[in-house]
Amino acid sequence: MPRLCSPRFCVNIMRHTHMYVKHKIDWQEVGRRIRTLRTRPQVEVSEMLGITQGQLSRIESGESRPSIEILLAISLLYRKSMNWILTGNNT
């Protein structure tokens, strides 16, 4: 299979397009942000997301990391960007 770019070239592209992760995600803060969005009981929201109440509780406490699918579902449910959910920044 042909390579589209050399590793050095790909790294440079990533640096110039800001595609690399600069900061570590604080999963406890992610959980707190999700908890602040929730206006209904955990049982109702967890059913809407297709997960158990216990799983939502662990996500909100930072004990468990939500999957990308769950993050997307939360983002759509509360009309908040995934960037805000993950970082607290609106940009």
Image (cartoon, rainbow, N blue to C red):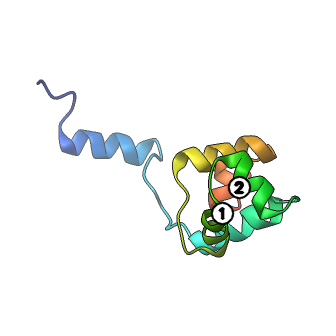
Q: Using the image as rendered, state which of residue 71 and residue 85 is in the foreground.
A: 71
| Secondary structure under the numbered disc 2 in the rendered image | helix
Q: Is residue 61 above or below residue 52?
A: below
Find residue 3 and report its horizontal and vertical position in percent: 16, 29
Find residue 29 and report its horizontal and vertical position in percent: 66, 72
Q: Looking at the image, which residue is at 65% across and 48% down? A: 82
Disc with the residue nearer the chain's start (2 vs 1): 2
Q: Decide if residue 91 is in sight here.
A: no
Q: Looking at the image, which residue is at 88% across and 59% down? A: 39
Q: CA distance from mark 2 to mark 1?
A: 6 Å
Q: Is residue 56 above or below residue 67?
A: below
Find residue 89 and report its horizontal and vertical position in percent: 71, 58
Residue holding disc 1:
56
Left or right position of 35 against 50:
right
Find residue 36 and report its horizontal and vertical position in percent: 81, 66
**Mark 2 touches mark 1? (CB < 8 Å):** yes
Q: Quadrant of residue 77?
A: top right
Q: Residues within 10 Å of mark 2 (few under 14, many from 20)?
A: some
Residue holding disc 2:
46
Q: Residue furthest right?
A: 39
Q: Amino acid at mark 2?
A: Ser
Q: Amino acid at mark 1?
A: Leu
